[in-house]
Amino acid sequence: MPPLLIRFESNLVLCYAYYMDYIEKTIQAYDSSADKYASSTDDMANKQEIQQMLDYMPDGEKVILDVGCGPGRDAQIMTDNGISVIGIDMSKELIKKAQQLHPGINFALMDVRNLEFPDNSFGAVWCNMVLLHLNDEDLKTALVEIHRILKPEGIVAISFKKGDGAKEVLETFSTDLSRFYNFKTQETLNQMVEEQNFEVLDSHEFNERQRFGSDKRDLDIVWTFAKKLR
C-alpha cells in the first residue's frame, strides 16, 4: 500500500470549535443517529454510479477517496472491486461505525475543505450525498481541495438532492435531528464544478423510490461526473 494510505485508525479527535454552526448541527445529527442512518441506507448503494466512476478513471489508477463515507457501505463495494479506498467523514460516530463494519478499510475523521493528502494523490473522489451539506462558499473550497488531490484527469463523482436554495431540514428517514441541505439542479451543479476547473463528462438524475423501492423517499437525485483539467 502506498505511503499516502498509511494513517488514521486512532485519529478520532475533532475540534468542533473550528466549524460553523450549520456544519456543527449536521455533524450532531449524524453522530446521534449513526445506527439509524446505517440501517436505513444499507440497501441504497448506487452501484450503477460506482461502476460509472470506475469506468471513467484513468487506466491503471486504483486509489479512491470516499468523501462522506458514512458507515462505509460504498467503500466496501469499491474494495470488493479491487480498489484501494480511504473513507473520510466529519461524523465521529459514523467513522466508528465504518471501522466496526469494515475493519479492513482505512477510515479517518477529516474535513473535505482541508484534505490531509498530497497533491495528485487519487485517481477518483467519490462524493455521494455529502457536498450537499455545504453552503456555496464551502462547496467551492471543497471542490478546490478535491481538484488538488486528484491526479491529472482524475474523476470526481458528486450527488445532490435536486432543487433550488438551501435550508435546514428535519428528515426522519435516516436521522432524528435537522441537517443543512444545499439543493442543486443538473445545471447549477455542473456550473459550480466547471468553475473549479473540471470538465463534466456526464450528468443525470433518478428518483430514489423508483430505483430502490416503494418504501423509499419520493426524491430526485442529481449526479455529475467530471474530469480534472490540468
Image: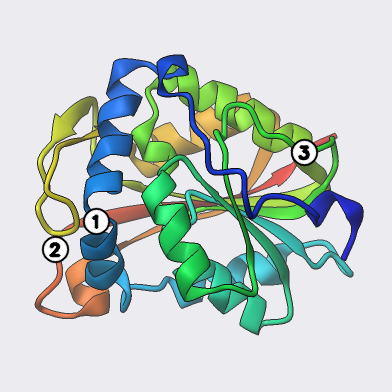
The amino acid sitting under disc 3 is Phe
Q: Which of disc 2 and disc 3 is earlier in sequence?
A: 3
The amino acid on which the numbered mark 2 sits, given as a three-letter code, is Arg
User: Which x, y percent locates residue 176?
Assistant: 11, 48
Residue 198 in the image, given as x and y percentages of width and height: 68, 37
Tell me where residue 46 sits by quadrant: bottom left
Could you say whether the residue bearing mark 1 is in a helix, strand or loop? strand
x then y, percent, for residue 102: 53, 74
Name the residue rendered at 10%, 78% in the picture. 214
- In percent of width and height, residue 85 lies at 68, 64
Which quadrant would the C terminus be assigned to in this image? Answer: top right
Look at the picture and state if 88 lies above or below 214: above
Left/right of residue 158 with respect to residue 221 in the rendered view: right
The residue that label 2 is drawn on is 217
Name which quarter of the figure residue 120 lies in. top right
Q: Which residue is disc 3 drawn over?
A: 117
Of the two numbered discs 3 and 2 in the rendering, the one whose residue sits closer to the viewer: 3
In the image, residue 56 above or below residue 143: below
Residue at image x 73%, y 73%? 83
Q: Secondary structure at mark 2?
A: loop
Q: Type of residue at label 1? A: Asp
Left or right placement of residue 209 versus residue 9 in this view: left
Query: Sequence order check: which comes first, mark 3 or mark 1?
Result: 3
Label annotation for residue 220: 1
Give the side of residue 129 with respect to residue 58, left or right. left
